[in-house]
Amino acid sequence: MQWLTNWMMKEGPGVRKDEPKKTGLALFVSIILREPWELFKLNLLMLLLCIPVITIPANLVAAGRICGLMIEDEVVFFWRDYWRAFGQRAVASTLWGLFFAVLLGICGYSAFIYGQLGLHDMVYVAPAVIAICLTLLVLMVAVCLFTILSKQVCLPALVLLKSACLAALAKPIPILAGIAFAALLWLAHVIFYPASIFLPVVLNFSLGTLAMVFGAYKATDFALQMLELVGSRQGAEESASI
Protein backbone atom coordinates (compact mmCIF):
# COMPACT_ATOMS: atom_id res chain seq x y z
CA MET A 1 0.00 0.00 0.00
CA GLN A 2 3.05 2.31 0.00
CA TRP A 3 2.38 3.35 -3.59
CA LEU A 4 -1.09 4.54 -2.59
CA THR A 5 0.33 6.59 0.28
CA ASN A 6 2.97 8.15 -1.97
CA TRP A 7 0.35 9.02 -4.59
CA MET A 8 -1.92 10.68 -2.04
CA MET A 9 0.81 12.62 -0.25
CA LYS A 10 2.75 13.92 -3.27
CA GLU A 11 2.41 17.55 -4.26
CA GLY A 12 0.13 18.37 -7.18
CA PRO A 13 1.37 19.72 -10.51
CA GLY A 14 -0.05 23.16 -9.76
CA VAL A 15 -2.02 25.38 -12.13
CA ARG A 16 -0.53 27.72 -14.72
CA LYS A 17 -1.73 31.31 -14.54
CA ASP A 18 -2.74 31.30 -18.20
CA GLU A 19 -4.46 27.92 -18.06
CA PRO A 20 -8.18 28.13 -18.94
CA LYS A 21 -10.60 27.10 -16.25
CA LYS A 22 -11.66 23.46 -16.56
CA THR A 23 -15.30 22.52 -16.81
CA GLY A 24 -17.34 19.35 -17.00
CA LEU A 25 -15.65 15.98 -16.86
CA ALA A 26 -12.17 17.55 -17.11
CA LEU A 27 -12.83 19.52 -13.92
CA PHE A 28 -14.14 16.43 -12.13
CA VAL A 29 -11.04 14.42 -13.04
CA SER A 30 -8.73 17.29 -12.09
CA ILE A 31 -10.34 17.50 -8.63
CA ILE A 32 -9.69 13.80 -8.06
CA LEU A 33 -6.06 14.16 -9.16
CA ARG A 34 -5.57 17.39 -7.24
CA GLU A 35 -7.22 16.41 -3.95
CA PRO A 36 -6.59 12.67 -3.38
CA TRP A 37 -5.45 13.09 0.23
CA GLU A 38 -8.38 15.35 1.15
CA LEU A 39 -10.80 12.90 -0.46
CA PHE A 40 -9.23 10.02 1.45
CA LYS A 41 -9.55 11.88 4.77
CA LEU A 42 -13.11 12.82 3.93
CA ASN A 43 -13.92 9.21 3.09
CA LEU A 44 -12.64 7.94 6.43
CA LEU A 45 -14.54 10.62 8.33
CA MET A 46 -17.75 9.91 6.42
CA LEU A 47 -17.35 6.19 7.05
CA LEU A 48 -17.02 6.73 10.79
CA LEU A 49 -19.92 9.18 11.02
CA CYS A 50 -22.24 6.92 9.01
CA ILE A 51 -22.02 4.27 11.73
CA PRO A 52 -24.47 6.03 14.13
CA VAL A 53 -26.96 6.28 11.18
CA ILE A 54 -28.72 9.35 12.63
CA THR A 55 -25.69 11.47 11.72
CA ILE A 56 -25.79 10.48 8.02
CA PRO A 57 -27.74 13.57 6.79
CA ALA A 58 -25.48 16.07 8.59
CA ASN A 59 -22.50 14.01 7.44
CA LEU A 60 -23.63 14.35 3.82
CA VAL A 61 -24.11 18.10 4.12
CA ALA A 62 -20.69 18.60 5.71
CA ALA A 63 -19.03 16.40 3.08
CA GLY A 64 -20.92 18.31 0.41
CA ARG A 65 -19.44 21.52 1.79
CA ILE A 66 -15.91 20.16 1.38
CA CYS A 67 -16.71 18.93 -2.14
CA GLY A 68 -18.22 22.31 -3.03
CA LEU A 69 -15.05 24.09 -1.99
CA MET A 70 -13.07 21.68 -4.16
CA ILE A 71 -15.35 22.39 -7.12
CA GLU A 72 -14.93 26.14 -6.60
CA ASP A 73 -11.16 25.59 -6.32
CA GLU A 74 -11.09 27.38 -2.98
CA VAL A 75 -8.79 26.67 -0.08
CA VAL A 76 -10.14 23.83 2.04
CA PHE A 77 -9.57 24.03 5.80
CA PHE A 78 -10.69 20.46 6.19
CA TRP A 79 -11.54 20.09 9.88
CA ARG A 80 -12.86 23.61 10.35
CA ASP A 81 -15.06 23.61 7.25
CA TYR A 82 -16.37 20.11 7.85
CA TRP A 83 -17.33 20.51 11.48
CA ARG A 84 -18.73 24.01 10.98
CA ALA A 85 -21.08 22.76 8.27
CA PHE A 86 -21.90 19.68 10.33
CA GLY A 87 -22.85 21.74 13.38
CA GLN A 88 -24.75 24.46 11.55
CA ARG A 89 -26.88 22.07 9.51
CA ALA A 90 -27.25 19.14 11.92
CA VAL A 91 -30.90 19.69 12.87
CA ALA A 92 -32.15 20.83 9.45
CA SER A 93 -30.32 18.09 7.55
CA THR A 94 -31.56 15.40 9.95
CA LEU A 95 -35.19 16.49 9.55
CA TRP A 96 -34.85 16.65 5.77
CA GLY A 97 -33.08 13.29 5.78
CA LEU A 98 -36.00 11.67 7.62
CA PHE A 99 -38.44 13.34 5.23
CA PHE A 100 -36.70 12.02 2.13
CA ALA A 101 -36.11 8.60 3.69
CA VAL A 102 -39.88 8.20 4.16
CA LEU A 103 -40.62 9.45 0.63
CA LEU A 104 -37.99 7.19 -0.95
CA GLY A 105 -39.24 4.26 1.09
CA ILE A 106 -42.82 4.78 -0.10
CA CYS A 107 -41.85 5.32 -3.74
CA GLY A 108 -39.33 2.49 -3.77
CA TYR A 109 -41.75 0.04 -2.15
CA SER A 110 -44.47 1.04 -4.61
CA ALA A 111 -42.10 0.44 -7.52
CA PHE A 112 -41.19 -2.98 -6.11
CA ILE A 113 -44.82 -4.05 -5.56
CA TYR A 114 -46.03 -2.84 -8.96
CA GLY A 115 -42.96 -4.40 -10.58
CA GLN A 116 -43.81 -7.77 -9.05
CA LEU A 117 -47.43 -7.45 -10.17
CA GLY A 118 -46.28 -6.37 -13.63
CA LEU A 119 -44.53 -9.70 -14.08
CA HIS A 120 -47.94 -11.38 -14.03
CA ASP A 121 -50.22 -8.69 -15.48
CA MET A 122 -49.23 -6.00 -18.00
CA VAL A 123 -51.78 -3.62 -16.48
CA TYR A 124 -49.34 -2.91 -13.64
CA VAL A 125 -46.36 -2.08 -15.87
CA ALA A 126 -47.37 1.57 -16.28
CA PRO A 127 -47.79 2.16 -12.50
CA ALA A 128 -44.41 0.47 -11.96
CA VAL A 129 -42.72 2.82 -14.45
CA ILE A 130 -44.39 5.83 -12.83
CA ALA A 131 -43.26 4.69 -9.39
CA ILE A 132 -39.67 4.25 -10.62
CA CYS A 133 -39.69 7.73 -12.17
CA LEU A 134 -41.06 9.23 -8.96
CA THR A 135 -38.34 7.46 -6.96
CA LEU A 136 -35.65 8.91 -9.22
CA LEU A 137 -37.23 12.37 -9.04
CA VAL A 138 -37.35 12.31 -5.24
CA LEU A 139 -33.72 11.15 -5.16
CA MET A 140 -32.70 14.00 -7.49
CA VAL A 141 -34.55 16.57 -5.39
CA ALA A 142 -32.88 15.19 -2.26
CA VAL A 143 -29.42 15.52 -3.83
CA CYS A 144 -30.17 19.11 -4.90
CA LEU A 145 -31.59 20.05 -1.50
CA PHE A 146 -28.58 18.69 0.38
CA THR A 147 -26.28 20.44 -2.09
CA ILE A 148 -28.05 23.74 -1.36
CA LEU A 149 -27.75 23.10 2.38
CA SER A 150 -24.01 22.53 1.92
CA LYS A 151 -23.70 25.98 0.34
CA GLN A 152 -24.62 27.55 3.68
CA VAL A 153 -27.67 29.29 2.19
CA CYS A 154 -30.34 30.11 4.77
CA LEU A 155 -33.80 29.63 3.24
CA PRO A 156 -37.25 28.83 4.66
CA ALA A 157 -38.15 25.16 4.35
CA LEU A 158 -40.74 25.62 1.60
CA VAL A 159 -38.48 27.89 -0.45
CA LEU A 160 -35.63 25.43 -0.01
CA LEU A 161 -37.79 22.58 -1.28
CA LYS A 162 -39.00 24.65 -4.25
CA SER A 163 -35.40 25.54 -5.14
CA ALA A 164 -34.38 21.88 -5.00
CA CYS A 165 -37.30 20.88 -7.23
CA LEU A 166 -36.45 23.63 -9.72
CA ALA A 167 -32.81 22.52 -9.81
CA ALA A 168 -33.77 18.88 -10.36
CA LEU A 169 -36.11 19.75 -13.23
CA ALA A 170 -33.80 22.36 -14.79
CA LYS A 171 -30.71 20.14 -15.25
CA PRO A 172 -31.68 16.50 -14.65
CA ILE A 173 -28.99 14.82 -16.79
CA PRO A 174 -25.89 15.88 -14.76
CA ILE A 175 -27.70 15.07 -11.52
CA LEU A 176 -28.67 11.60 -12.74
CA ALA A 177 -25.10 11.09 -13.98
CA GLY A 178 -23.73 11.90 -10.51
CA ILE A 179 -26.18 9.52 -8.85
CA ALA A 180 -25.36 6.79 -11.39
CA PHE A 181 -21.63 7.24 -10.80
CA ALA A 182 -22.08 6.88 -7.03
CA ALA A 183 -24.26 3.80 -7.55
CA LEU A 184 -21.65 2.25 -9.87
CA LEU A 185 -18.99 2.64 -7.19
CA TRP A 186 -21.04 0.52 -4.79
CA LEU A 187 -22.00 -1.91 -7.54
CA ALA A 188 -18.30 -2.41 -8.30
CA HIS A 189 -17.72 -3.07 -4.59
CA VAL A 190 -20.40 -5.78 -4.61
CA ILE A 191 -19.39 -7.39 -7.90
CA PHE A 192 -15.66 -7.57 -7.19
CA TYR A 193 -15.96 -8.47 -3.50
CA PRO A 194 -13.76 -9.59 -1.69
CA ALA A 195 -11.08 -8.04 -3.93
CA SER A 196 -12.86 -4.69 -3.50
CA ILE A 197 -13.13 -4.92 0.29
CA PHE A 198 -11.11 -1.71 0.77
CA LEU A 199 -13.09 0.42 -1.73
CA PRO A 200 -15.49 1.82 0.91
CA VAL A 201 -12.56 2.66 3.17
CA VAL A 202 -10.57 4.41 0.44
CA LEU A 203 -12.99 6.24 -1.86
CA ASN A 204 -16.62 5.11 -2.16
CA PHE A 205 -18.14 7.59 0.28
CA SER A 206 -16.19 10.71 -0.63
CA LEU A 207 -15.97 10.08 -4.38
CA GLY A 208 -19.66 9.25 -4.57
CA THR A 209 -20.53 12.42 -2.68
CA LEU A 210 -18.23 14.47 -4.91
CA ALA A 211 -19.94 13.03 -8.01
CA MET A 212 -23.44 13.85 -6.76
CA VAL A 213 -22.53 17.35 -5.58
CA PHE A 214 -20.67 17.98 -8.83
CA GLY A 215 -23.69 16.90 -10.85
CA ALA A 216 -26.08 19.11 -8.87
CA TYR A 217 -23.81 22.13 -8.36
CA LYS A 218 -24.65 24.16 -11.45
CA ALA A 219 -28.31 23.21 -11.24
CA THR A 220 -28.56 24.52 -7.69
CA ASP A 221 -26.66 27.67 -8.67
CA PHE A 222 -29.23 28.23 -11.41
CA ALA A 223 -32.15 27.63 -9.02
CA LEU A 224 -30.74 30.05 -6.43
CA GLN A 225 -30.15 32.69 -9.10
CA MET A 226 -33.73 32.34 -10.31
CA LEU A 227 -34.95 32.58 -6.74
CA GLU A 228 -32.97 35.78 -6.22
CA LEU A 229 -34.28 37.20 -9.50
CA VAL A 230 -37.90 36.47 -8.59
CA GLY A 231 -37.37 37.97 -5.14
CA SER A 232 -35.88 41.15 -6.57
CA ARG A 233 -38.75 41.51 -9.06
CA GLN A 234 -41.33 41.07 -6.32
CA GLY A 235 -39.55 43.65 -4.21
CA ALA A 236 -39.51 46.10 -7.11
CA GLU A 237 -43.23 45.55 -7.77
CA GLU A 238 -44.08 46.09 -4.10
CA SER A 239 -42.03 49.29 -4.04
CA ALA A 240 -43.73 50.53 -7.21
CA SER A 241 -47.21 49.81 -5.81
CA ILE A 242 -46.41 51.76 -2.64
Image: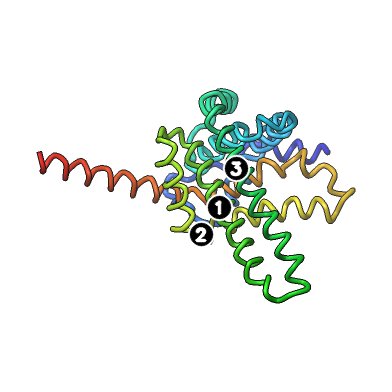
Quarter of the image for residue 97 reads top right
In the picture, the disc for residue 140 is: 1
The reply to whether the C-beta atoms of the residues labelled 2 and 3 are less than 8 Å apart is no
Q: Residues within 10 Å of mark 1 (few under 14, many from 20)?
A: many
Which tag is nearer the camera, tag 1 or tag 3?
1
The span from disc 2 to disc 1 (Cα, nearest Å) is: 8 Å
Q: Which mark is residue 172?
A: 2
Front residue of this view, candidates 108 and 51: 108
Q: Is residue 122 left or right of residue 64?
A: right
The residue that label 3 is drawn on is 34
Label 2 vs 1, first from the N-terminus: 1
Instruction: Assign a secondary structure to mark 2.
Output: helix
Image height check: is 60 above or below 181?
above
Amino acid marked by disc 2: Pro
Q: Residue at x 70, y 38 (%)?
A: 8
Q: Residues within 10 Å of mark 2 (few under 14, many from 20)?
A: some
The reply, left or right, for residue 42 in relation to residue 18 is right
Residue 184 in picture, x, y percent from top left:
71, 56
Mark 1 or 3, nearer chain start = 3
Q: Do the residues under discs 1 and 3 have CB atoms within 8 angstroms?
A: no
The label shown at residue 63 is none
Identify the element where label 3 is drawn.
helix
Q: Earlier in the sequence, mark 2 or mark 3?
A: 3
Q: CA distance from mark 1 to mark 3?
A: 27 Å
The residue under the point 87% across, 50% down is 193
| Front residue of 227 and 151 | 227
Mark 1 belongs to which amino acid? Met
Mark 1 residue element: helix
Q: Residue at x 52, y 29 (%)?
A: 89
170 left or right, relative to 193: left
Give the percent coordinates (x, y) of residue 236: 17, 43
